[in-house]
Image (cartoon, helix red, strand yellow):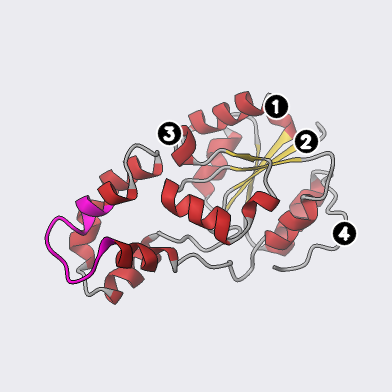
Amino acid sequence: MATITTILWDVGGVLLTNGWDHQGRAAVLAQFGLGRDAFEQRHEQPNDAWEKGLITVEEYLNKTVFYQPRSFTPADFFAAMKAQSQVLKDSALGILSSLATSQSLTLGMLNNEARELNDYRIGQFRLREYFNVFLSSCYVALRKPGSQIFRLALNVLQADAASVVFVDDRPENVEGANSVGIHGIRYQGSEHLKAEFERLGISLGAEAVPQ
């Protein structure tokens, strides 16, 4: 087995909540009294472009919410969107923090996220303290589970796929990583992740504690 030199991490569902998933959207829509069906019909196409960094949050909201006058502002709505981001109940942040002290590992963020939310989450949860590289969809204009984003990561990192691990909570994204030879691990809680890392010969060093 090749020595693991790089670990790539999803964020939502592994470290933090999925801030703008269907549950987050439902909560914010209810807060502002908006119909969910009408919103979801408008959401998919602009969300794809937003997560690829092709449009701004203002453009996304104009297409999904502010196509007609509202009693609240885009700033009000976006603040509620950001509030959906919290530390996951069984977060891998403690494990990530432990690994960040390693001199032999490169840690990277590889997630599907729109720029404004991504930048907020990076700052709010101090993710720059852990990661060496940020390969978010909004920065590279590619999304998981497509193999292209994983191939790009290998090229940017100049890494052999066999030396790279990717952690994600969604099976289809793990399969996307596996398809290019990366070791995909589905996140099923911190204890399971520790066991998977141990199997791959990844030492956590100091005791990893929940954040």
Q: How many marks?
A: 4
Position of the N terminus, as image quadrant, is top right
| Disc number lying in front (3 or 1) | 3
Asked if one can make out residue 19 in the rendered structure from this viewpoint, the answer is: yes
Front-lying residue, 154 or 125? 125
The spot of residue 182 in percent (x, y) is 65, 34
Mark 2 — residue? Answer: 5
Mark 4 — residue? Answer: 206
Q: CA distance from mark 3 to mark 2?
A: 25 Å
Dot 1 lies on which element? loop
The answer to which quarter of the image holds residue 156 is top right
Dot 3 lies on which element? loop
Mark 3 — residue? Answer: 141
Q: Residues within 10 Å of mark 3 (few under 14, many from 20)?
A: some
Dot 2 lies on which element? loop
Give the extent of the magenta segment. Answer: 61-74
Up-down relation of residue 159 to residue 191 (above or below): above
Dot 4 lies on which element? loop
Residue 159: numbered disc: 1
Q: Are marks 2 and 1 in contact (CB under 8 Å)?
A: yes
